[in-house]
Amino acid sequence: MSGITLSEGPALYAVVTLVAFGLAALAVATLFRRERRQVGQAIVLYAFAVAARVAAFACGELQLVAFERFNDFVALLLQGMAFLNLALASVVGVLVAILRYEPPRILRDLTKAFVYFAFTLYLLWTRNVDLTGIVATSAVVTAVVGFSLQDVLGNVMGGLALNIDRSVRVGDWVSFNGMSGIVREIGWRHTAIESRDGDTHIVPNAQMMKSAVTLQGVRTAGSRQQRRSIEFPIDLRFAPSRVIATVAESLLRQEIEGVAAEPAPHVIMSGIRDGMVVYAARYWLCDLERDLSVDSAVRARIATGLERAQLPIGIPRSETHLALERDENARVLDRLRKRALEAITNVDIFSSLTEEERSELAARLRFVPFAPSDAILVQGEEGEYLVILSRGSADVTVSVREGEPSSIATLDAPDFCGEFGMLTGERRQANVVATTEVDAWRLSKDDFQEILAQRPAISEEVSRVLAERVVALRAAREHLSEQARVTMVESQHRSIRERIERFFGLGR
């Protein structure tokens, strides 16, 4: 480039270099889209080079030789920097595309500065400028600047070290001096850490290098996960083995979004405080950004699991509090009895029961709440109980050997499920998973058996209702005639009645 001057053909020079630059910029922007910012910087440099070239031409027309040479030099320098920018962008693009390695920003900036400096010295050398004095002067200036800007240089060197050794990377979740957040940028002077509250903390790189930084969820082997622990107290009256088994079953029964399947959640007894046994449910968090929301989902699963098992979370209370609690419990119990009777009324298979039989059956219901994503029934599982939904919704899915479970129906309260398990003992044919907070009631085989023993004819009535429900679904799918439907109802009625009587041991 130094061999071509304005006097040797400025028009040809301008056209050739402009076309070459345009084609090169277009190629880099097309092949390496992530480097378009660098292409934009190159275009800006080239635009300034054109402006310097115009200024040099104007100075030449005005016979201002010194200014003409200076602007000519600036134009060549900026033009060369523009082409070098494109070359560096191409190198980085190739590294990312082939080696899957993206150089740190600081390393790219250092490389660019070194190349610019070397190119500037080359241009000066072609113009017979004595470089010895420049190098000596620059060394003295560097020493003075370095002494006066120790803190700034410390931050710069810290940023350089962080980018080269990759101990902390953009996207890492870190804990630092009581602060926790995700690393958004590692610059020359500082590291930007964004907290979960949306605040961005600007930390000097020198401070990052001097202090201990915890990389959250980063292990020697395995995916990025962080172990979390949720503590809860339970009264000493309840056996630890029962509490641990209940909570573990609740956590493992259905997947919780954000909780790792491996290692699986588990429960331990962590201590005894204030007359209470303290347990800890420990799990591995997959999405570190959602730590609090996943903690909340795990707590909800623990609470509903304990309530279904009638294991109340213990809280130290005074005698006054206990007396008030007994009064409140009495009122709650009365409300629950009314709700249980209403739940029984909404189950059509019990429509033939007398009012007294319904009241007796309602007294045997057990309240079982479910949190969202909680499994109410699990396909293939043995379960000799019926579940009645009095509030909320649930999704009915069927699992196949491969792929995700497919949704086949939605249950909206008031509704029920699991009737065949309670009446015939057959395994669950589908999964039922809560999609909202669900209030439900559970009726077991043993509870229903006592009612059935008093009046065995109930099996005849219940089996007919079940048969009509089964045939109604099949008739809707297969468009059965009325005669075929009646015949099928009778056949299903006999089959279901025999299975109920066999399961409950009636007529023996």
Image (cartoon, rainbow, N blue to C red):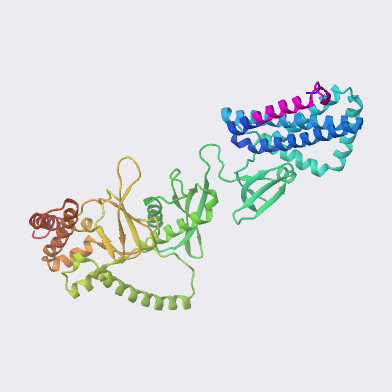
How far across and down, in percent of the image, does residue 140 sit? 90, 33
Secondary structure, magenta segment, majority class: helix
Which residue is painted at 15% across and 65% down in the image?
452
Which residue is painted at 85% across and 26% down in the image?
124
Residue lying at the far top in this picture: please name it. Answer: 3
Q: Name the residue nearer the viewer: 362 or 25.
A: 25
How far across and down, in percent of the image, does residue 149 sit? 84, 43
Q: Name the residue nearer the viewer: 19 or 381.
A: 19
- Say which quadrant the N terminus sits in: top right
Which residue is painted at 22% across and 55% down in the image?
421
206 is within the stretch colored magenta: no
Left or right of 81, for residue 230:
left
Is 287 located above or below residue 365 in the figure? above
How far across and down, in percent of the image, does residue 102 sit? 62, 33
State which quadrant residue 5 falls in.
Answer: top right
How far across and down, in percent of the image, does residue 152 sit? 80, 43
Give the magenta range: 3-24
Residue 309 in sight in this render:
no
Is 506 located above or below residue 358 in the figure? above
Left or right of 502, for residue 371:
right
What is the count of numbered marks?
A: 0
